[in-house]
Image (cartoon, rainbow, N blue to C red):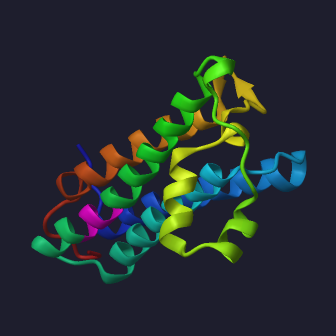
Amino acid sequence: MTRFSFRRLSFVGFLLCVSGLAFALVLQHGFGLEPCPMCIFQRIAMAAAGLAFLGAALHAPTGSGRRVWSILALIGALAGAGIAARHVWLQGLPPDQVPACGPTLGYLLGMLPVADVVQLVLKGDGNCAKIDAAFLGVSLPGWTLIAFIGLSLYALLLPALARRHSIFA
């Protein structure tokens, strides 16, 4: 079995994250699907995982450094998976149990401390429960959850997938 360097595999993780963010921007600007606050937080988590993968690719560590970068990417991916799971849960609620719609993220950031905004957004509101689009019967947050689970597994397995000694480490 051919094994690839940690640097290359980390760069692949970065490209996967960039692709996910690019797809989100195409949906927003090309198809007019405005992101709800939870969608924006998922984008932040995707960017965090991507930056960790990029850091790993640029640093090309050996030994325990590989685990550190992988854990950083894993944290970003798991945070995104948690937010996406909450989003999917909100979308599955019966209409009478959906929280009321709240103000926009921009308004919240202008009026409240960031910690309070994060807490409010993670609770979710009616905007986040609305299903704007689905593919194969799965909503966009559902696909995002699948992507974050895949990225989490990739980050977790990254050190094992990479060969220990590479000329191009």
**Residue at figure coordinates x 46%, y 67% from the top left:** 48
Q: Position of residue 97 (x, y in %)?
A: 61, 23
Tell me the residue at 56%/38% (across/down).
87
Q: Position of residue 83 (x, y in %)?
A: 48, 46
The reply to whether residue 63 is in sight is no
The secondary structure that most of the magenta stretch takes on is helix
Please indicate whether residue 151 sits to the left or right of residue 31 in the image.
Answer: left
Q: From the image, which quarter does the C terminus lie in?
A: bottom left
Quarter of the image for the N terminus: give it: top left
Q: How many dots with numbers?
A: 0
Residue 164 picture quarter:
bottom left
Which residue is found at the position 31% from the left and 56% from the top? Answer: 74
Does the rendering let one see residue 13?
Answer: yes
Start and end of the magenta stretch?
69-73
Closer to us: 154 or 121: 121
Q: Position of residue 154 (x, y in %)?
A: 33, 48
Residue in front for this viewpoint, 147 or 116? 116
The answer to whether residue 23 is magenta is: no
Is 106 above or below relative to 55? above
> Looking at the image, which residue is at 78% across and 33% down?
132
Of the pair 4 and 53, the residue shown nearer to us: 53
